[in-house]
């Protein structure tokens, strides 16, 4: 009766885990008959999953019923929930039910409680994949390290720090860029030493591929720091024209300004330990504090509070459907932001 509960907003990592599980369970020869991919947001497909999960596998290997956007532990009709609870004891030993959802299971539901009881008995399994907050430097570092390990890629500490700064908590983009970096590293290795084992990804390789891809968003913040609103808007429009998502730009700016605020506040309080400052500001590389101190000379914490307020107004405008270029322009040129 193997049931797997997979949840979290890190869809790239959860999808990798699910696909790895499918490959482990199913004999490739029998994939077409032993694998069902269903959408749990459709009641008919959710019901279909409960019917199919009672069927043992054909041929060799096991059988997998994958339910994306699973409703069973996140709210569904009482009839569907009752049917789910009834089948828990009826799943054949070689049939695996994988329930996937971005949301955390609702512990108040009877279906969730029943599944949790099985998890405690090791008759079901739960795995979560949660993205760190945009300002959680340590969490983003762990995300980069974990993703690299899953992809069998080796990073230097400096390369990890650069990826944290450039990509943040965008797991899908991180996966894509790590694969590109791996190809580039292997190409360079083969040109220099064909007998070397799998190449390390170093800071200079990261710089070679992603410099200018994500640092432009940070450069927008540098323009705001210098009170050069015109330059900031030009860079914003350039990024938007390239198809960069507005909310991703906003998240980068928010993280950057929040870091400045922490550094400024701690400096004002007389804190000298760069490790303490970096941890509070969510900055992966403490050496950046020395550079930031020079950048922030003459700037008061209130300025960064004002900028955060403007960014919050821009986020509200974006979520109301205002065009990104207009939302950023109106927000950054407002009286509260441009003084």
Image (cartoon, helix red, strand yellow):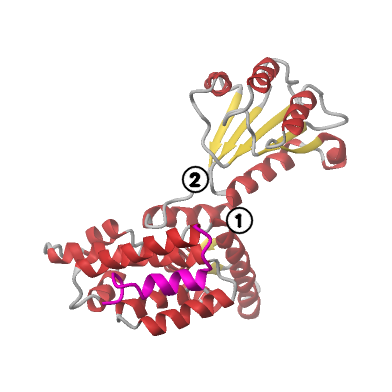
Q: Count residues near mark 1 (Cα–Cα under 10 Å), then give few for <14, some for 14-19, many for 20+.
A: few
| Residue drawn at (81%, 24%) of the image | 56
Q: Is residue 132 magenta?
A: no
Residue 134 position, x and y percent, is 42, 57
Left or right, 245 with respect to 138, comes to right
Q: Is residue 326 magenta?
A: yes
What segment is highlighted magenta in the picture? 320-339
Kindly identify which residue carries mark 2. Answer: 130
| Residue drawn at (72%, 36%) of the image | 42
Mark nearer the viewer, 1 or 2: 2
Kindly identify which residue carries mark 1. Answer: 151
Left or right, 300 with respect to 198, comes to left
Looking at the image, do the residues carrying marks 1 and 2 touch, with CB atoms under 8 Å apart? Answer: no
Residue 240 appears anywhere in the view: yes
Residue 35 position, x and y percent, is 80, 37
Residue 176 position, x and y percent, is 61, 63
**Which of the pair 68/270 is nearer the observer?**
68
| Residue drawn at (13%, 66%) of the image | 268
Q: Is residue 91 above or below residue 251?
A: above
């Amino acid at each position: 009766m193997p049931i797997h509960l997979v949840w979290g907003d890190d869809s790239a990592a959860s999808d990798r885990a699910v696909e790895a599980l499918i490959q482990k369970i199913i004999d490739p020869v029998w994939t077409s008959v032993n694998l069902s991919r269903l959408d749990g947001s459709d009641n008919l497909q959710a019901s279909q999953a409960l019917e199919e999960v009672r069927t043992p596998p054909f041929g060799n290997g096991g059988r997998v019923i994958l339910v994306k956007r699973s409703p069973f532990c996140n709210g569904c009709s009482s009839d569907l929930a009752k049917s789910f609870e009834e089948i828990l004891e009826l799943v054949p030993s070689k049939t695996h039910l994988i329930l996937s959802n971005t949301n955390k299971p609702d512990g108040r539901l009877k279906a969730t409680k029943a599944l949790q009881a099985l998890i405690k008995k090791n008759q079901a399994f739960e795995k979560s994949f949660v993205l760190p907050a945009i300002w959680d430097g340590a969490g983003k570092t762990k995300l980069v390290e974990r993703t690299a390990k899953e992809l069998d890629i080796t990073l230097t500490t400096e390369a990890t720090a650069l990826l944290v700064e450039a990509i943040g908590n965008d797991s899908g983009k991180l996966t894509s860029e790590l694969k590109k970096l791996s190809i580039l590293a292997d190409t360079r290795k083969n040109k220099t030493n064909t007998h070397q084992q799998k190449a390390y990804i170093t800071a200079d390789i990261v710089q070679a591929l992603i410099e200018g891809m994500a640092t432009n968003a940070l450069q927008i913040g540098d323009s705001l720091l210098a009170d050069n609103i015109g330059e900031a808007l030009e860079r914003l429009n350039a990024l938007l024209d390239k198809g960069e998502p507005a909310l991703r730009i906003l998240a980068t700016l928010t993280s950057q300004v929040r870091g400045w605020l922490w550094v400024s506040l701690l400096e004002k309080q007389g804190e000298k330990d760069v490790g303490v400052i970096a941890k509070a500001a969510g900055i992966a590389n403490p050496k950046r504090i020395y550079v930031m101190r020079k950048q922030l000379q003459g700037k008061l914490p209130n300025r960064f509070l004002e900028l955060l307020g403007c960014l919050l107004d821009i986020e509200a405008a974006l979520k109301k459907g205002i065009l990104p270029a207009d939302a950023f322009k109106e927000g950054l040129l407002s009286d509260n932001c441009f003084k």
